[in-house]
Image (cartoon, grey):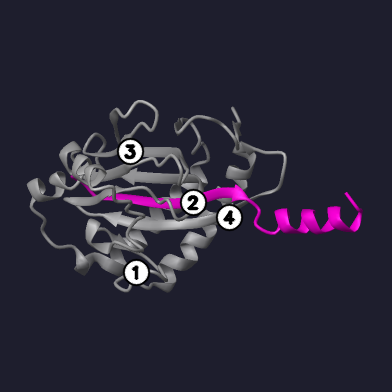
Amino acid sequence: MNRIPINSGQAFIELTGWLDDPEIVEAIRELTAAQQDAAGKRVTPVDPETARAMVDEPALDRILNNGADIHGISTNREISNVISFNSSTDPGSVQSGAVRSLRILVDDWVSHRLLETFEAPYPLEVSRSGHFWYPQGGYMGWHTNSGAPGWRIYITHAMKAGKSFFRYRDPETGQVITSMDDEWNVRVFRIDPVVPLWHAVYSDTDRFSLGYIVRRRRWYKPVTRKIMQMLGR
């Protein structure tokens, strides 16, 4: 397995063959079924043209021209119609014990695998991020996640391949790139508040996503500094 240096200059990476354990794939399938049971009544029809307009290039151009920074739905819920689960920052999030229990099982496997995937000269930690269901016509408008630096990882499961996508603006070239979904995708992208990676999502099928953040373990830096001070270094 190719490892990713934590200080890699790459902004976006697609991991292929990463979900190679049939048990974890089945666990995610069970999780998505639990999400549908918990929130099926929340699915409402959406005008596809309205949804696509939220994730097209002109929409991003307007944001950039205004000099705005949109962190994500935790601060700008109006940019998306996704159904979120067990979120403490989204008042409309679906709270489900069944979904929470199944996600804990998935998180244990994913966290272990991510710590194997990234390499760093210091300890790393994995924390969970977004947990979303994009029904048909679901979208997440342009945003940067700039308030939570680190490497963002999303595992996505689309019921129909080729009907949904992840779209991002390359921070070096400014080119807008659309990455179409297969049935399963694992995408890794770097969140840097100084050099933002604008990104958006659209789905014309049921699409389920699990988000994670990999970053320096937060206790490590201050503890190390304290030890160095004690040693007189």
Q: Are marks 1 and 2 in contact (CB under 8 Å)?
A: no
C-alpha span from label 2 to label 4: 12 Å
Q: Which residue is mark 4?
A: 108
The CA span between labels 2 and 3 is 19 Å
Marker count (numbered)? 4
Examine the rendered structure and indicate whether residue 227 appears above or below residue 201: below
Query: What SS does tag 1 mark?
Result: loop
User: For mark 3, what is the residue?
Assistant: 183
Instruction: Tell me which numbered mark, 4 or 1, is placed earlier along the sequence.
Output: 1
> What amino acid type should be assigned to the residue bearing mark 2?
Tyr
Q: CA distance from mark 4 to mark 1?
A: 24 Å
Nearer the observer, disc 1 or disc 3?
1
Q: Which residue is mark 1?
A: 90
N-terminal of the two: label 1 or label 2?
1
Q: Nearer the viewer, mark 2 or mark 4?
A: 2
Asked if disc 4 and disc 1 are in contact, CB closer than 8 Å, the reply is no
Residue nearer the viewer, 211 or 32:
211
Residue 32 locus on image (x, y percent): 36, 56
Residue range corresponding to the magenta coloring: 204-233
Residue visible at 27% across and 45% down? 201
Instruction: Mark yes or no: residue 134 visible.
Output: yes
Q: Does the magenta run of residues contain 42? A: no
Disc number lying in front (4 or 1): 1
Instruction: Name the residue located 10 percent from the left edge and 47 percent from the top edge.
Output: 48
- The circle on residue 212 is 2
Q: Is residue 122 left or right of residue 96?
A: right
In the image, what residue occupies the spot 46% across and 30% down? Answer: 16
Mark 2 or 4 closer to N-term?
Answer: 4
What amino acid does circle 3 point to? Glu
Q: Distance between the Cα atoms at labels 3 and 4?
A: 22 Å
